Image: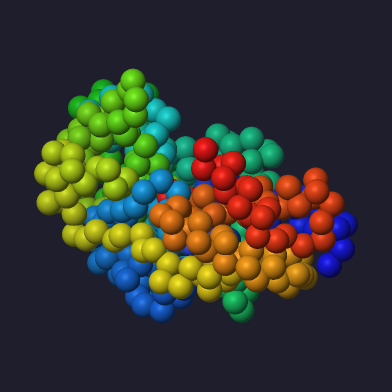
Amino acid sequence: MTHEQLRQVEASRAFEATRRFEELALYHVPFDQLNGDDRTESTLARLVGAGGRVAIIGPSGSGKSSIIASVFGPFSEDLPVDIVPLRIPVAATQDTTVTEPGELARHIVRYVTRWASRERFSTTEQEGFERGLAESTRRSAGGRSRVFQIGLPLWLVSAEFSRQVQSTGEEYEFHGSSTDAIEHLKRLVELFAAHSLRPALAFDDSDTWLRIPGLDRTEVANSFFTRGLGMLSREVDVSVVVAVHEEYLTLPGYVRGSQLLSGEVRVPRLIDAVDGIGTILRDRLVISELSFALDEILEQDAILALAKHYESGRSMRDVLRVAQRALQHGVSDGVDRIAVPIVDQASTELSS
Ligand SMILES: Nc1ncnc2c1ncn2[C@@H]1O[C@H](COP(=O)(O)OP(=O)(O)O)[C@@H](O)[C@H]1O
Ligand SMILES: [Mg+2]
C-alpha cells in the first residue's frame, strides 16, 4: 500500500479505542467467537434472559462496556425479545445518587422517563437515533435487528408504551419524595410487565470507584453494591448487569453484595492474542469501509508485537491505542507499512 493509503487508514481512526458507548456494539467481536467457547456473551445473555443479576468483571479497558453494549445491542441474537435493555449511567452523578437507595430509584425513574420522552431530546439527537437505527438495520444480517436495543429511546420503538412510561414517571417527578421513588420504580416495572416486557438495567460505568493516590472512592462502590443493589433485588423484579472492576473483588461491600448476584462473568483474556487482535483489527477496517488487508498496513511481525504487548498484561484498550499511535508515527515517518520498531516506540510511549 502507499503512504497516502496509510494516511487514509490513520485518518479514519479505524483502530482508535475511544468509542462512545453507542458505538461499542458495532466494533465488538464476541469473545465467545474469538476464544471458541460460550463463557462470555452467551453466558451473560442467558443469565439476563433468566432474569438474573449479573456482574461483568475485569480491569479497566478489558471490554466490560463493549460486552454489555454487544449483548444488549441491535445484533444480539441470544437475548430474549421481551428484554428491554436500559443503560443507567452512574459514574458522573453525585455519590448519594448511587449510595442512597431512594436516590438511586429516583435516578432510574428519571432516566427511564427521559428515555421515553421524545421532546427531551434535541432535533439533532433525534436524527442521530434515527440514523443509528437505520444503520443497525442495514448492518444486521438479513436486515433484522432487535426491537429493543440499549441506547435506543423507547419512543422510537413504541409510541403508546412510551407515553405510558412517560406519564408514570412524570407524575412522580412533580410530586415525589425520595421515599416514594422506590414505589414509583415498582410501578414503572409493573408497567413493563403489563406489556409483557422485562426491563434489564445496565450499569456499565459502575467500575470507576477506585482507590487512587490521594482519593479513595471505594466507599461509593461498597454502598452501591450493598444498599443500591440490595434495594434493586428486594424491591423490583428486574435483570441487572453491573460492571465490576477487578479491584472491587476484595471490597467488603462487593463481597457482601455479590451474594445478591445470580452470576459473575469474567472478561476473558484472548486465548490466541495474534489471532484475536488480528480479527478485531480486520473487523474495524471493514466497518470503516477500508478495503485493505491488515498485513498491508502492519507487517506480520508488527502484529506479533501488538500481541506481545497484550500478553505482557495490557488491556484491549491499550492494544488499540498502541495500534492507532503506531499509525500516527507511520504517517509522520513517511512509511507505507508499519514495522516492529514503530509499534515498540508507540507501546513504550503509551506505557510510560
Ligand atoms: N471483544 C472485543 N472486540 C472488539 N473491541 C473490543 C473488544 N473488547 C474490548 N474492545 C475495545 O477495547 C476498548 C476497551 O473496552 P471497554 O469495553 O471500554 O473496556 P472497559 O469497559 O472494561 O473499561 C474499547 O475501545 C472496545 O471497543
Ligand atoms: Mg467501561
Q: Residue at x 18, y 43 (%)?
A: 250
> Residue 268, how many percent across, how many down?
36, 63
Q: Which residue is drawn at 87% across and 63% down?
A: 2
> Residue 229, how many percent across, how many down?
21, 43
> Residue 171, how many percent across, how many down?
36, 31
Q: Which residue is drawn at 73% across and 47% down?
A: 328
Q: Which residue is drawn at 64% across and 35% down?
A: 122
Left or right side of 212 for 65? right
Q: Is residue 256 above or below residue 215?
A: below
Viewer can see residue 320: yes
> Residue 47, how many percent across, how many down?
27, 65
Residue at the outermost top position: 214
Report the colour scheme.
Answer: rainbow
Left or right side of 104 for 142? right
Q: Quadrant of residue 49?
A: bottom left
Q: In this view, does 174 lie above or below 325?
A: above
Q: In this view, does 110 lie above or below 57?
A: above
Viewer can see residue 95: no
* Quadrant position of the N terminus in the picture: bottom right
Q: How many numbered circles are shown?
A: 0
Left or right side of 303 for 191? left
